Image (tube, rainbow, N blue to C red):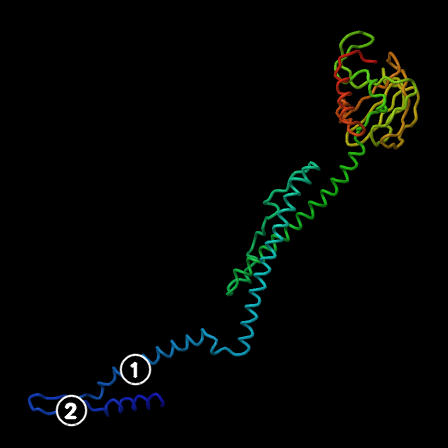
Amino acid sequence: MCIDYCLRWLVFLFMSRLKFYYDEKSLSYKAVNTSRFSAIPGIVLFLLSSIFFGILTLFVLLNTDALNTPKEFLQAREIENFKLQYELLNKQLEKIEEVMANVADRDNNLYRVYFEASPIPEEQRKMGFGGVNRYKDMEGFDNSELIINTTKRLEVLTKQVVVQSRSLEELESLAKSKEDLLGAMPSIQPIHKNDLKRMASGFGYRTDPFTKKRRFHQGMDFTAPRGTPVYATGDGVVARVDNRAAGYGWHVRIDHGFGYVSLYAHLSKYNVKRRQKIKRGDIIGYVGSTGRSVGPHLHYEIFKDGKRVNPLNYYSGNLTAEEFDIMLNLARQENQSMD
């Protein structure tokens, strides 16, 4: 009813306004003959213009704060605050990521190298999470990209922390094993270093004192007066105390673990017994000349994984650089062995 009334009023308005034109022939003004429907195009144009400007005005108002309620103002402030907090969080994440990168670098290139462990690949440290879309619930919002990016960085950082934590646990175990290894490895001279210059023969080919032929000498000989103390070169358990091995006479073997065994031959007296636990530096016996020997001396050997190795490579515990050079020069001399 209201629309019909408005249309009638508009038609009356346009029709009530008579228009005239000047007729040159009759030299007078004459009324313009208009039909009842001639005003419709103008009415339609007016309505369309009104609708267009109404929609435009509504769009502008909806995109400004002019029509916002106090609650909407509060929500907008909260959203801006959340955006600021996310940006601050991302800056903090950057600093934490730098720290984690530094820790990972030291872990791979320092700690794991020292303990002879394989480095952890970068892909494993920063590997993401596959499978379904974990961030589907965060999509479709104005700040979805910011929220998803922050969440991803937090998850990767969490993964890095877990990987690094496991690495440190592994390193702790390796450190304990390394400590045990360093304590067990034969690393001191079995005769006091004051008798260093009395070393008679080293590891390698030497002249046999009995056959006078060149043969491979499996250990090192230290000449010393009978009864000179002989020291354990590393922590371990006494494996043998007997004279049943050909040529060694009275001898002691110590199992150090980690594949290391040390042998002390031609002793005159024992100071330990089988299965006894000992520490590096304990006196295990005394120099003698039992077995295949041409004089009082200590024949010393080291086994690694069942194979004899040069004991000279393991003197790191009680010799200075100068003393080690002296021993090195003496060990290189192809002289006659004592056994």
User: Which corner quadrant holds the C terminus?
Assistant: top right
Residue 71 position in % (x across, y down): 55, 77
Q: Please provide percent x and percent y for residue 27.
A: 8, 91
In the image, is 177 to the left or to the right of 162? right
Q: Is residue 63 above or below residue 314?
A: below
Residue 267 appears anywhere in the view: yes
Q: Position of residue 64 (x, y in %)?
A: 46, 74
Q: Nearer the viewer, residue 297 or 263?
A: 297
Q: Nearer the viewer, residue 5 or 320?
A: 320
Label 1 element class: helix
Residue 208 is labelled as none
Image quarter where the N terminus lies is bottom left
Circle on res. 46: 1
Three-letter amino acid code of the residue under disc 1: Phe
Query: In which quadrant of the rendered view does residue 262 lie?
Result: top right
The residue tagged 2 is 31
Residues 119 and 34: in front is: 119
The answer, for residue 243, to whether it is visible in the render is: no
Q: Earlier in the sequence, mark 2 or mark 1?
A: 2
**What's the residue type where badge 2 is placed?**
Ala
The location of residue 308, given as percent across then percent down, is 76, 22
As drawn, 263 above or below 109: above
Task: Answer with left or right where residue 31 lies relative to residue 303.
Answer: left
Q: Residue furthest left?
A: 25
